[in-house]
Image (spheres, rainbow, N blue to C red):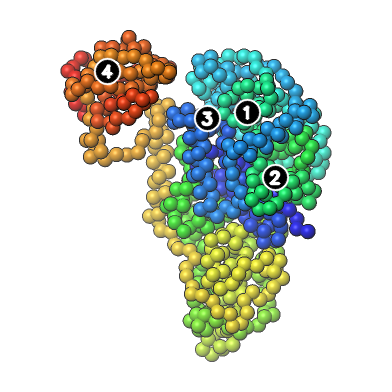
Amino acid sequence: MQKKKMITAALPYANGPVHIGHLAGVYIPADVYARFQRRLGSDVAFICGSDEHGIPITIRAKKEGVTPQDIVDKYHSIIKKSFEDLGISFDEYSRTSSENHKKTSQDFFLKMYEKGKFTEEISEQYYDEQAGEFLADRYIVGTCPNCGNDGAYGDQCEKCGTTLSPSELINPKSALSGNIPILKETKNWYLPLNEYENFLNEWIIEGHKDDWKPNVYGQVKSWLNDGLKPRAMTRDLNWGVQVPLPDAEGKVLYVWFDAPIGYISFTKEWAEKNGKNWKDYWQSNDSDLIHFIGKDNIVFHCIIFPAMMKAHGDYIMPTNVPAFEFLNLENDKISTSRNWAVWAHEYVEEFPGQQDVLRYALLSSAPETKDNNFTWKDFQTKNNSELVGIFGNFINRVAVLVHKYYDGVIPTGNENAEELSEISKTAKEINEYLSKYEFRNALSALMNLARFGNQYLQTEEPWKTIKDQPEKAANSLFVGAQIAVGLAQLCEPFMPFSSEKLLNMFNTEKISWQEVENAKVLVKTGHQINESSLLFSKIEDETIDFQIQKLENTKQSNAKTNPKANPMKEEITFDDFTKIDLRTATILEAEKVEKADKLLKLKVDTGVDVRTVVSGIAESFTPEEIIGKQVMILLNLAPRKIRGIESQGMLLLTTKPDGKLSFVTPDETVENGIEIG
């Protein structure tokens, strides 16, 4: 019976694209492991999807002036395509906004509720009086009590990694208004994590001391030593999975309650499509559950989610949680807010056909046990010196010489040649390393086989012996071809696109890992290979300099005189600017738009004509106070209908520190219709 491998990768927040830190710390290692397990013959379910209920999504939506659904629709599509483009071989990539996920999460909650696993507690939580809503942890910012970072969130300090609660922050403020929030009573449902301490100690501390990564084991042990406290599993929010209880209006499931359940709901979707039983992967002792995550998610996957599954009663516990540390970029922490990142979708566009170069570079620098660093110069060196100079060079030499001397037919050679044992040895080494989640060592073993092949050819020199010792030359290229095909087979988990090219080049099929381990001969004498082509191309200095300059531009942009200023918009040309028609104008009439709290309907004298403008300024101005006010108007903006009213222009305004709007006006009264610019 095939061993089932239930492999999950942390759900990315659908509030932005994925970057190299995500790829190196979760998705590429998870993909390597899933591909490897498939080659071993395991029954693999490799599952992931977009986390669309996180507070970062609502924050992004507010900043962009759109709905949370707009945000998740946009970024789910970008993220999913990025994964596909980079060969991340998910069996199912779904999203937590699906009806299936909503039902699965609510059913999970109800089962725990009916078993009496929650406690109902009235607590005081931070409330923003101006915004009129309770503040989720991510909507509270303040000073971290651990490291002094002024930008810590109410659930975590991203600078030092400490998990926090809002009450621990020094000088907490609302991220919505910037005001100091008040404490207000509200009811929520709590999971008493303290009741699961004995179970977690027995399962992890006693059961996985020797086989879990030290960073994971150490962090969990620290949490348990400090003692666990009840944690709210519901929140006062209007975006997320609604709490399925009659007295829970305006409350949703805590994102770290519903997000990991996504692994289950997405498995259900995959199983239904493929005629499988999802319970075989989640509720059977014949299944290994492995979570690939970053170190900031350890507590959720090793304490909260296991406690939830234990309380539910029907689920297996994770076999392993191989969490990775963080990847820095050019010796600085990757930051989405500062745009200090290499974005996956941009890489695919700017390095077409070179997905495996990024996979290789990130795997070779994978932050397995400590934070690591990515630099563009190191990326270039890994490509030019290792992939082109070692791996690609060996493959090219073998393929070219077989075509040159034997018309592309594998020559006769010694099937018991000692050198052939290197293929089996490498396959077993990679097997051993990947079974222990040591991806860098596994990749090194693969490259060592390519190095061995190069050294072998250099020693044998078939291009010389072909004249005087044709049998020796034939044997050299027979052995070289076996190593080349061995590399084609063994590189597939790491560099799937290159593996596919290689297998096609040598006109052979992918075989199981065990066959590679046990076979000395992978292509027989007389086998016809196809035309050779270069696997990797040299990356020039100009290409790398361009990427470094992009980051330098970002650094300069971040060094703003006003930290609150939004980044510069996309550059326009002078010709674009000359198309803009800005004029002085006077507001003649103003009235509120029916059933629209933010909109005013204005009659404006532009000097050219009198026209209607609909403007979202009702929260900053009353109609009476702006009649007769001279303003500036963008005159040649294409008309658009707003609430059924055709608006013919846009007024120029700025936002004051208190969030209110202010008109951009002339220093003194002038005639209407005067052009500005």
Residue 73 x/y as whole percent: 50, 39
Q: Residue at x 66, y 27 (%)?
A: 243
Residue 605 x/y as whole percent: 22, 19
* Mark 3 residue type: Thr
Separation of residues labelled 3 and 2 (CA atoms):
29 Å
* Residue 156 in view, yes or no: no
Quarter of the picture holding the N terminus? bottom right
Q: Residue at x 66, y 41 (%)?
A: 265
* Mark 4 residue type: Lys
Q: Residue at x 52, y 84 (%)?
A: 406
Look at the numbered disc 4 and give the secondary structure of its residue: strand
Which residue was labeled with disc 3?
58
Which residue was labeled with disc 4?
603
**Front residue (pair 500, 277):** 277
Figure check: 10 above or below 173:
below
Q: How many marks?
A: 4
* Residue 279 in view, yes or no: yes
Which residue was labeled with disc 1?
242
Which residue was labeled with disc 2?
321
**Front residue (pair 287, 542):** 287
634 left or right of 143? Answer: left
**Front residue (pair 600, 46):** 600
Quarter of the picture holding the C terminus? top left
Q: Which circle, 4 or 3, is nearer the viewer?
A: 4
